[in-house]
Image: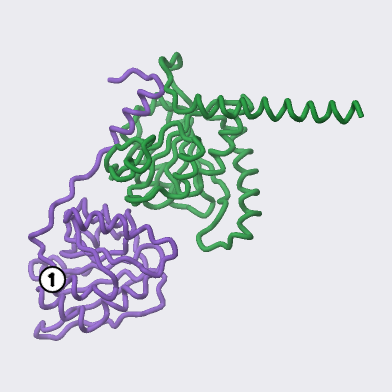
Amino acid sequence: MVEAVSVILVAVITTTLLLVRIIYVISQSSKPIRNTCTKHLSTLVVLGSGGHTAEMINLLSVMQTDRFSPRFYIAAVTDTMSLQKARVFETSLDDKGAKSTKFMQIYRSREVGQSYITSIGTTLFALCHALWLMVKIRPQVILCNGPGTCIPICTIAFIFKVLGIRWSYIFYVESIARVKRLSLSGLLLYKLHMADQLFVQWPHLQKQYPRAHYVGPLM
Amino acid sequence: MDDDSNNSFESKKIVFVTVGTTSFDSLVKSVDTEQVKQELFKKGYTHLVIQMGRGSYIPKKSSGEEDGSSLVVDYFTFSSSIADYLKSSSLVISHAGSGSIFETLRLGKPLIVVVNEDLMDNHQSELAEELAERKHLFCGSPQSLYKVIQSMELESIIPYHPGDATPVAKLINRYLGFPSD
């Protein structure tokens, strides 16, 4: 009897602590850092495909890459073009950090046209793969812009924050193709407060999602 | 690209059709109709080049009439030099992918975007319609393509000024506490 009570008590206390921690993490997300003492932050760039990758490279080309180093690029296993584009971009850079850049591939949670039932299994698999990659990289900054490839990564990043393993700042740029509605990835990161900052490229979206930042077209 | 393209460059007016990395048979079919080819020819275009991707519909090749009274039609599946085809064309008819749209707009080429209505999650039309409203391009469906060509006025196009990613970079820098400079 005493044992049962103590088990329940432990369970209740753990859940409460976990909930408090989750609420704390959410409330701390989207709070800017006052002053960075470090000179550079390790950065994970999640590349989408086609137009998404082009937008991301456009963004990287105007960022001070020495502040965002070392850099890690991740693209879907099925997407052969994106890492190639990232390599071309990295070789065009004139900074010493570019040598330490790493390129990796990740299994996608769902391929275009895949049924929702089989996608449960593949999503779990993608999550495990994301966990493995995140343990290896433990980035301080995550830059992503959809499509779904970034969701397992951002989920693991959120769990790491809750457990105090690593605090990563997540920046999500919604695709220029989204004029009236956020994509599913964008919506998830927005609603669950997982992105520290979420950028949209059309004014209409900012009206609909007030916490988003309107930045005008990147392309 | 033919070798004689330089010789007859001035007289050539190429329409380039691109479906991107997948397939878009209803667009290729629509472009291959007499109706559409007639409209293009009436507008003064001389050549039609179709990038048909993985599609199964094969358009009819044509070397045109000797007296130049019809379009010269050619097609291919994929090419690593899409950019060259875009550059040499006088009009681009494209699928609604953002990569293809912005590459064409940056080159300042007149553009008709044809939205694939068979796609499940059809968010692609949003971008094409928004840019059409801002008069940067024309937008239609495979069925309405000939009407779009018939009624389009190239003078009404407002050139697209490429966007800029620096606002995003600034916000990220400020957020992370990096000094702005």
* The C terminus of chain B lies in quadrant: top left
Task: Tell me residue A206's x, y (percent).
Answer: 33, 40
Q: Which residue is mark 1?
A: B151
Q: Residues within 10 Å of mark 1 (few under 14, many from 20)?
A: few
Which chain comes out green in the rendered image? A
What colour has chain B? purple
Task: Tell me residue B96's x, y (percent).
Answer: 32, 61
Q: Relative to A100, say whether A182 is above or below.
A: below
The chain to which mark 1 is attached is B
Q: Look at the image and name its color scheme.
A: by chain
Dividing the picture into quadrants, the one containing residue B50 is bottom left
Q: Relative to A37, say whether B124 is above or below.
A: below
Q: Relative to A99, say whether A185 is above or below.
A: below
From the viewer's perspective, is A203 left or right of B37?
A: right
Task: Tell me residue A183's x, y (percent).
Answer: 43, 49
From the viewer's perspective, is A187 left or right of A58?
A: right
Q: Residue at x 37, y 79 (%)?
A: B57
Dividing the picture into quadrants, the one containing residue A114 is bottom right
Q: Residue at x 27, y 58 (%)?
A: B128
Dividing the picture into quadrants, the one containing residue B1 is bottom left
Camera-nearest residue between B179 and A29:
A29
Q: Relative to A117, say whether A11 is above or below.
A: above
Camera-nearest residue between A202 and A138:
A202
